[in-house]
Image: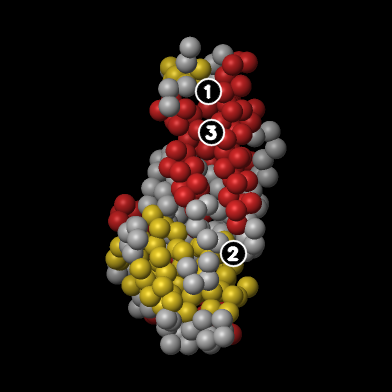
Amino acid sequence: MLALQKGNGFHIIRVPISTPTLLPHTTTNCYLIGNSQESILIDAGFDQPNTKVDLEKAIRENGLAIPKTIILTHWHPDHAPGVRQLVDWDPIVYCHPLEKQLTLEAISPWSKLSFLNEGDIVPVADHNLTILHAPGHTVGQLNIYIPSEKVLLAGDNIVAEGTSWIGPPDGDMSDYIQTLNRLKQLTLTKIGPGHGDWVTKPYEQIDFVINRRLFRENQIKELLVNHKRLTSTELTNIIYEKLPHPSVFDVAKRTTEAHLIKLINEGFVLLDNSFYSLKD
């Protein structure tokens, strides 16, 4: 657990919750923001008892109020369903409206759901949180920017180690790269990632992710030049020779497919009967 604290008792606390997420990560970050009078929770982790245990321990240790607001960066099973463990807080849960149905399914039977959009301001403990609609990893991904602290809570747009997977059905590589370039325009001292430790060199990390994605795109083009035509499975097997665990092959393939969709939309690649090739 790592907290940023101001003299007035305002905290931003990263609470890593053990979750069955994708390697190399073994925890998902939740963030507590506020003071003894009011606080907000960003993301609720996985639906398991230790989610509530770990969060309430962090609340006690830092003298925070029980959150009555939970903002979900996105609906994925390691970020949203932990709401079910927190129902006795009687929270109002927020997500982006594009993820209404998926979020309702993720947190059911809890149904106190409201929505946040680009540019909304959420006050807490005399500080303002600025809501960013930051699609790419999911269509309704929310990021939370705290201007007074120059801190960005990036959901799965940024992870501390490696890069996030991006892919169908609701991920979009073009949106993702646009989002990353937009995040670079913020004034930042730290990024709170969806997984892993605080990112203390925010611009370097964003550039690393952008460069990794562009490297993969160029790699796909080169492979299609050399092999003429390949399936997404064949491309993934060549590109990702060393995966941390076989269980992540599916999301690696979906990331490959997200790159291919982007290249098709840009007119560089053709799809014919499951085979991809470069356009002449």
Residue 211 shown left or right of residue 114 in the figure: right
Q: Residue furthest top?
A: 280
Residue 103 shown left or right of residue 173 in the figure: left
The reply to whether the C-beta atoms of the residues labelled 3 and 2 are less than 8 Å apart is no
Disc 3 crowd, CA 10 A, few/some/many (<14, 14-19, 20+): many
Q: Which residue is mark 2?
A: 189
Q: Where on the picture, by quarter, is residue 121?
A: bottom left
Amino acid type indicated by mark 2: Thr
Residue 224: horizontal and vertical position, in percent?
Answer: 57, 19
Label 1: state its secondary structure: loop
Taking the spot 29% from the left edge, 69% from the top edge, the residue there is 112
Label 3: state its secondary structure: helix
Residue 149: horizontal and vertical position, in percent?
Answer: 53, 71
N-term mark: 1 or 3? 1
Q: Residue 256's mark?
A: 3
Q: CA distance from mark 1 to mark 3?
A: 10 Å
Amino acid type indicated by mark 3: Thr
Q: Which residue is mark 1?
A: 231
Question: Which one is in front, 13 or 272?
Answer: 13
Amino acid type indicated by mark 1: Thr
